[in-house]
Image (tube, rainbow, N blue to C red):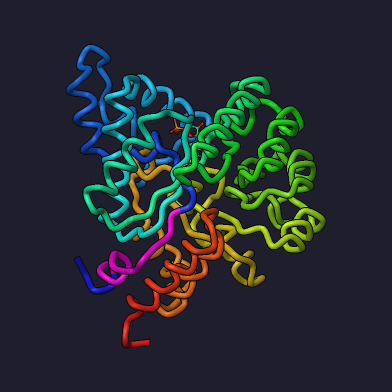
């Protein structure tokens, strides 16, 4: 590994946008495939390799294949533990994983904690747009129950899934309920261009963080009024470069909207989205941002540190993380 790669691996990092089943690595897939040979699933069906691209529709077909492989309690436990370990090995100190709520995810987090892994893991309960408003409301009720069970692991709600399915207005009652009971909201917004009107509506909640937000700003067909709402409420954006390139919502790295928001001085958090499907990790994503936009190691350090202010866990956790970052700060800058 060259010096630059070592720097990004050792850089302490915060991961705030990671879908559990999209984060399953090649090695874990191997184990799942050998458990279920009758499904005849190959790696080319569960991951998009280097240089390859798919449409966003095709990406959602990939998730369907993965869901066939991860369908028992044992699978979910194994997948959750492997994903947490891999993020920890990649230098992630605080992780918010998002997925449909399952007891096994909490078990995995407790088991990883007892193994002494150096990573604080929290959960965002995912509403999949495909499942409609009634399921969304049930999901929020379940998240509330999880939150009240007081181990502090469930901190918020994610609205995700195929952005071309359904309209955000149907999810407003569920999202408002979540907000009122203290769950924080991270919403996929303007991931595709046709979502402008929906974003106008959902930004009025307002959400606590935005996933992607690719088409919010005027240069990408969004509008100044959308940008103004995001800026006024200081809503951080979770940005996932490789995902957007491989899913073809952004044509090339240099045109990624990271540049627009970074130049505005607006809070952005670099994330992986689906490290398994898109064959990446958070260190690579940081390195990619640095090389594409010419940022120094010092500037990248600052980005990783500022991500702490965007986490959903309580203030005491933010303070602990800030202390860790101070301790780990390199002498050179
Ligand atoms: C929107 C996405 C996504 O929940 O089964 N998901 N939703 N946009 C994306 N950009 C590429 N990537 C993943 O993890 C997989 C699910 O996460 C959502 C989809 O609903 C996908 O089915 P879980 O753990």
Q: Position of residue 158 (x, y in %)?
A: 57, 39
Residue 195: in magenta span = no
Q: 325 and 289: which one is in front? A: 325
Position of 321 with respect to 75 (left or right) is: right
Q: 45 and 152: which one is in front? A: 152
Q: Position of residue 182 (x, y in %)?
A: 64, 45
Position of 71 with respect to 213 (left or right) is: left
> In this view of the protein, can residue 26 be seen by the observer?
yes
User: Is residue 93 depicted above or below 210 in this figure?
Assistant: below
Q: Position of residue 25 (x, y in %)?
A: 28, 40
Residue 71, image quadrant? top left
Residue 68, image quadrant? top left
Of the 4 image quadrants, the one containing the N terminus is bottom left
Residue at x 34%, y 42% (from the top left corner): 109
Q: Position of residue 221 (x, y in %)?
A: 73, 50
Residue at x 19%, y 20% (from the top left corner): 35
Q: 154 and 76: which one is in front? A: 154
> In this view of the protein, can residue 246 be seen by the observer?
no
Total marks drawn?
A: 0
* Residue found at the very far right of the displayed protein: 225
User: Is residue 291 depicted above or below 225 in this figure?
Assistant: below
| Residue range of the region highlighted in magenta in the rendering | 5-15
Of the 4 image quadrants, the one containing the C terminus is bottom left
* Residue found at the very far top of the displayed protein: 38
Q: 318 and 82: which one is in front? A: 318
Residue at x 54%, y 38% (from the top left corner): 148
């Amino acid at each position: 590994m060259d010096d630059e790669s070592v720097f990004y691996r050792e850089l302490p990092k915060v991961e705030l946008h990671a879908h559990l089943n999209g984060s399953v690595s090649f090695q874990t897939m191997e184990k799942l495939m050998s458990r279920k040979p009758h499904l005849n699933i190959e790696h080319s069906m569960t991951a998009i390799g280097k240089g390859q691209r798919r449409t966003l529709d095709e990406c959602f077909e990939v998730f369907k294949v993965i869901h066939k492989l991860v369908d028992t309690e044992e699978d979910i436990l194994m997948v959750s533990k492997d994903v947490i370990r891999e993020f920890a090995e990649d230098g992630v100190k605080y992780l918010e994983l998002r997925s449909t709520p399952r007891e096994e995810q909490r078990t995995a987090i407790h088991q990883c904690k007892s193994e002494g892994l150096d990573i604080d893991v929290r959960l965002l309960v995912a509403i999949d747009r495909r499942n409609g408003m009634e399921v969304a409301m049930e999901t929020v009720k379940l998240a509330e129950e999880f939150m009240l069970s007081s181990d502090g692991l469930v901190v918020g709600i994610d609205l995700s899934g195929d952005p071309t399915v359904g309209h955000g207005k149907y999810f407003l009652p569920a999202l408002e309920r979540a907000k009122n009971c203290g769950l924080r909201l991270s919403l996929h917004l303007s991931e595709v261009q046709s979502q402008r009107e929906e974003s106008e509506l959902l930004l009025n909640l307002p959400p606590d963080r935005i996933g992607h937000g690719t088409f919010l700003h005027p240069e990408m067909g969004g509008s100044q009024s959308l940008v103004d709402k995001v800026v006024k409420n200081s809503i951080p954006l979770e940005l996932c470069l490789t995902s957007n390139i491989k899913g073809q919502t952004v044509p090339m790295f240099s045109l990624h909207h990271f540049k627009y928001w970074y130049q505005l001085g607006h809070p952005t958090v670099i994330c992986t989205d689906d490290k398994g499907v898109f064959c990446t990790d958070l260190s690579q994503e940081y390195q990619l941002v640095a090389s594409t936009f010419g940022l120094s190691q010092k500037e990248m350090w600052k980005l990783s540190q500022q991500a702490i202010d965007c986490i959903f866990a309580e203030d005491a956790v933010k303070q602990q993380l800030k202390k860790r970052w101070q301790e780990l700060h390199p002498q050179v800058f």
